[in-house]
Amino acid sequence: MSRHEGEFGNTWLRTLPRRAALAAPALLLAGRAARADWPMRPIRLIVAFPAGSATDVLARVLSEPLSQELGRPVVVDNRAGGNGIIGTQAAVQAVPDGYTFVVISTSAASINPHTLRQMPFDPVRDLVHVGALAEAPYMFVVPPGAPDTDLGGFFQRARQRPGGLTYSHGNASSMIMTEVLARGAGAQLTAVPYRGGAEALTDVAAGRIDCTFTDMANGVTQSQTGRVRALAHSGKDPTPLAPGLPAAASVVPGYDIKVWFGISAPAATPVPIVARANQAINAVLQQTGVVDRLRQLGFLPFRQTPEQFGQYLREQLRVWGEHVRVAGVEPQ
């Protein structure tokens, strides 16, 4: 290296702290500008499940108040298929400019990585997790004419007839919940798969199937009208969604399985935009009208920072991995 190159290098090194000091405010201002200017156009919120699904209903309840909070339309875009794979992958592959988000959920981020041999994306690495939306227990129901009046009685009957009682499931969550509960109770049930939760519930109401874990909205409605009998819910604590309904943990100690929903965005979405989106989500989830509507639909809203939600998602990935193992589900 020549003397002049050495002098230039030394000069650059001597001025580095001053340059860094000058650059820091510029970066801060750039971050503030990104937050101040966003959003400038409509925002796409991908739902990886069909119209009318629980995820879709949740997204549509929140899209209008989010639009008002952000000052731009939040447009729901259904990209169904592959149990959440297609829509979530569309979000992973989108430009990380703050105009594409996805409703992430238990299926796509907690179950699929353990039940699929090949995942086209990593739900932890390939997305930035903006904020939680809601969680919900499921409701365990039997036909109205069943002899069981409580969950303990149901499993006592099931243990007397190994494999003789059936359960329906319309999604992986319901199937895994039921298998984990039955095995914890020392019973064996026979699974009967259905295309969706509504069909699975219909055949329980008709007495053709002995039980199912269904979402709270349908479970509450059908049990209140006497079409099914509710025996328990899948959380470990009392739930305001069904006051007085026992927890499954009363029969299988430690049992606590709920589904969850949140919003994520493509990795590398600017941090100020993620922060602003999180602020808007949490503001909406505090609105009384939104909270009431979500509870009517069987959801319990909860709020988290992006950091908290990222940690929650990683923990749920681990927890559901254990549920999948206990349920004996083999990757496909």
Image (spheres, rainbow, N blue to C red):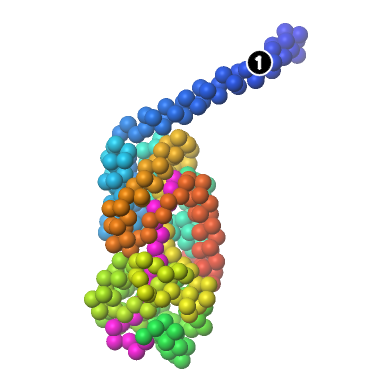
Q: Answer whether residue 223 is magenta in the image.
A: no
The image position of residue 252, as x and y in percent, is 50, 78
The image position of residue 100, as x and y in percent, is 37, 41
Q: In the visual, does 9 lie left or right of 193?
A: right
Q: Amino acid at mark 1?
A: Thr
Which quadrant holds the N terminus? top right
**Which residue shows up at 27% across the image and 59% down it?**
52
Q: Which residues are magenta?
A: 129-148
User: For the residue labelled by badge 1, is the local secondary structure a helix, a strand or a loop?
Assistant: helix
**Which residue shows up at 37% across the image and 79% down it?**
231
Is the stretch drawn in magenta largely helix, strand or loop? strand
Quarter of the image where one finds residue 237: bottom left
Q: Which residue is mark 1?
A: 15
Q: Nearer the viewer, residue 286 or 98?
A: 286
**Which residue shows up at 59% across the image and 21% down it?**
21
Q: Answer whether residue 134 is magenta in the image.
A: yes
Query: Is residue 219 depicted above or below 74 in this figure?
Result: below
Would residue 79 be visible to someone looking at this image? no
Residue count near mark 1 (Cα–Cα under 10 Å), binned few <14, some 14–19, many ≥20: few
Would residue 275 be visible to someone looking at this image? yes
Q: In the visual, does 317 lie left or right of 99?
A: right
The image position of residue 40, as x and y in percent, is 32, 31
Query: Is residue 184 depicted above or below 82 in this figure?
Result: below
Q: Total number of numbered labels?
A: 1
Q: Residue furthest top?
A: 4
The image position of residue 145, as x and y in percent, is 29, 87
**Which residue shows up at 51% across the image and 68% down it?**
323
Q: Residue furthest bottom?
A: 160
